[in-house]
Amino acid sequence: MLTPVARLPVVTTELDALLRQVARRDVEAFASFYDQTRARVFGLVTRVLRDPGYSEETTQDIYIQVWRTADSYDPVAGSPLAWLMTLAHRRAVDRVRSEQAASARESRYGAANVDLPSDHVADSVILRDERRQVADCLGSLTDAQREAIQLAYYDGLTYAQVSERLSANLATIKSRMRDAIRGLRKCLGIP
Amino acid sequence: MTEPTDPDLIALATPYALHAVPESELADIERQVGAAPPAVAQAFADEVRAVRETMAVVSAATAVEPPEALRDRLLTEVSTAPVVELRRKARPWRTTILAAAAALVIGLGALGVGLALRPAPSPSTAEQVFAAPDVRTVSGQIATGGTATVVFSRERNAGVLVMNNVAPPAPGTVYQMWLIGDKGPESAGTMDAKAVAPSTTAVLPDLGSSRALAFTVEPPGGSAQPTGPVFAQLSLA
């Protein structure tokens, strides 16, 4: 049984201040914001797109969008990291769907798991520690929950496609997704 | 605390937040949330927020360092002017452009040029723009050939775009127009190869606070946000 970890060291306050500076066209603040978040963004995009070239292009697009729209970040609506990762995931999923690459990727890679990439991993100590905690929490989900998150979040399938893929009805898939998030949230100690 | 009474809608909050609902269902879900009782809307928003905060933390699990070169490219792009402003033609408002634009609007409007603009191009909007006391014209050369002209009125909050002899987009792509305002770029419609050649007009029905009209190349159907570089821009300031 996993015990909830203490609030993870997501540098929200600092990212918040950096984003406000980025909104004022501060290039140095933009560089710091990039350095603190680049591995998360590039890693997520790579996980979704599975193509280094596309992933680099899409990551560039994401940060250009950050540069252009930093002033639209509303701290009341959530943390800066959630704002960024939502934007990044949206772009990656849009790219996958527009390339209609889902079937091609699948035949190349088979049913992927939420395995951790073994090389080129981000080497910041904080991230490494957090990575271990998250991996433990992903491990605490049921296989069915993990599979639903894998197909929807990392493979960019819609919940209806996930339901077809797993031959489970829509209500079951939706509750698996919800339970997976609840499990992760509790395990990670996210308020 | 009582449970919100719309379990079907609340059940969609997680897929919605994971970007796992198809584009075609998004508007309907958002409409339902907008029309729902406050407690239901709040429950939906709370769930979306919780999912996003959770997945933000989970992103540590997939972290991978990007190539060093990406940092240099990004910093160069944001440090230098990201967009080469189209050369503004150094001539004042000219009746000939307006007349040409008006003729094109009428001519092509009748042919039903296949523009995927939000509302259908409306001759009355164009007429209102042309008749507005504060009507202005900006025009510029497109690098790959051709001319883009916007006739617009702040008072009418609308404009008419005229494109002449602009090369069509490469096969499998469209041109997308963006109104650049305080909240970043907002799509003003797309044009495919059929819509572009040889001349095109499009009504821009809501200029809002936009300061410029920008053009990018996007996949068919357009994108929610620009994904390609801006290849032309007209200042509406």
Image: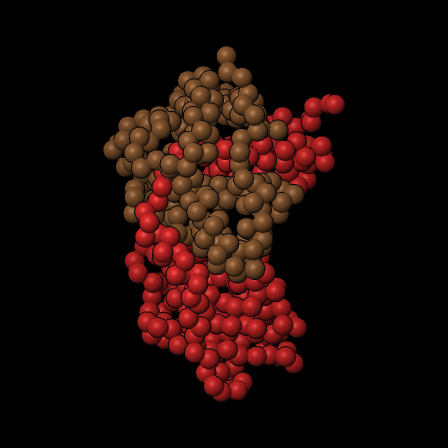
What residue is shown at x 41% (from left), y 52% (from top)? A61
Considering depth in this image, is A190 or A183 the residue closer to the camera?
Answer: A190
The coloring applied to the image is by chain
What residue is shown at x 60% (from left), y 79% (from top)? B135
Considering depth in this image, is B124 or B15 the residue closer to the camera?
Answer: B15
What residue is shown at x 35% (from left), y 44% (from top)? B66
Pinpoint residue B160: horizontal percent, then vertical percent: 52, 71
Pinpoint residue B174: horizontal percent, then vertical percent: 38, 58
Q: Residue furthest right?
A: B1
Pinpoint residue B121: horizontal percent, then vertical percent: 53, 65
On screen, residue A59 versus residue B44, left or right, reads left
Considering depth in this image, is A137 or B99 the residue closer to the camera?
Answer: A137
Total marks drawn?
A: 0
From this view, report whether residue A51 is shown above or below residue B79: above
What residue is shown at x 57% (from left), y 79% (from top)? B136
Q: Give the position of the N terminus of chain B as an image quadrant.
A: top right
Kindly indicate the quadrant of the structure image that contains residue B230. Answer: bottom left
Q: Residue furthest left?
A: A108
Is residue A118 among what the camera can see? Answer: yes
On screen, residue B64 versus residue B107, left or right, reads left
Q: Residue furthest front?
A: A125
The chain displayed brown equals A
Is residue A160 among what the camera can see? Answer: no
From this view, report whether residue A30 is shown above or below residue B25: below
Q: Give the position of the C terminus of chain B as an image quadrant.
A: bottom right
The chain displayed red equals B
From this view, report whether residue A5 is shown above or below residue B236: above
Pinpoint residue A34: horizontal percent, then vertical percent: 45, 49
